[in-house]
Image (cartoon, rainbow, N blue to C red):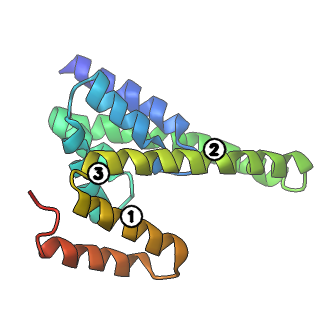
Amino acid sequence: MMATLVSLAIIFAQLSLLAFGGGNTILPEMQRQVVEVQHWLSAREFTDLFALAQAAPGPNMMVVTIIGWHVAGWPGVLVASLAKFGPSSIVTGLVLGLWQRFKDRPWRRVVQAGLVPITVGLVAASALLITKASVHEWSLGLITATVALVTWRTRVHPLWVLAGGALVGLSGVGQA
């Protein structure tokens, strides 16, 4: 048990410090660590837990807490959550003061401009990972492509898209 908790702490502390642009940017590495390296979950279980965490109210990285629960119960919840949210919160608190102090410096715009494509790439990698793990037949692929197109090309609120997806899911489309 102690070795598992140490592994949870190391993995999620590292991921915490890599989460530029939000928690979802670390999904590919999180999936690789918990599925391929540690074998705590299958790829399907990871995707299911991610979907459950996204549907629940609260922080968008609730998947970390759920993985901690799945792996080691309440101690896993505590260790995974502290490891994921602690280091990034401390770094953010420290950097925020410096970021405000140097708000008029030209290099700050260069740093921000450099972080945007990195964040976009990481979010795209996360979306691809979740799509690959959850689309198993052509009807689900069509639904995914339609949702991506609607959210990208229109101003339809994401909650309406989610409601549409729920209705499609209730109809039984894509369920094996």
Q: Amino acid at mark 2?
A: Ile
Which residue lies under the disc numbered 1? 145
Q: Earlier in the sequence, mark 3 or mark 2?
A: 3
Q: What is the number of the mark on residue 118?
A: 2
Which residue lies under the disc numbered 3? 50
Q: Amino acid at mark 1?
A: Ala
Q: Is residue 108 above or below residue 84?
A: below
Q: Amino acid at mark 3?
A: Phe
Q: Earlier in the sequence, mark 1 or mark 3?
A: 3
Tell which tag, 1 or 3, sits nearer the viewer: 1
In the structure shown, which secondary structural element does the residue marked by tag 1 occupy? helix
Which residue is drawn at the image coordinates 29% and 31% (left, top)? 34
The quadrant of the rendering that contains the C terminus is bottom left
Badge 2 local density, few (<14 within 10 Å), some, or many (20+)? some
Residue 158, image x and y in percent?
Answer: 41, 75
In the structure shown, which secondary structural element does the residue marked by tag 2 occupy? helix
Residue 113, image x and y in percent?
Answer: 76, 51
Badge 1 local density, few (<14 within 10 Å), some, or many (20+)? few
Badge 3 local density, few (<14 within 10 Å), some, or many (20+)? many
Q: Does residue 87 show up?
A: no
Instruction: Quote the CA–CA distance across marks 3 and 2.
Output: 22 Å
In the structure shown, which secondary structural element does the residue marked by tag 3 occupy? helix
Q: Which quadrant of the figure has residue 82?
A: top left
Which residue is drawn at the image coordinates 28% and 64% (left, top)? 55
Q: Does residue 80 show up?
A: yes
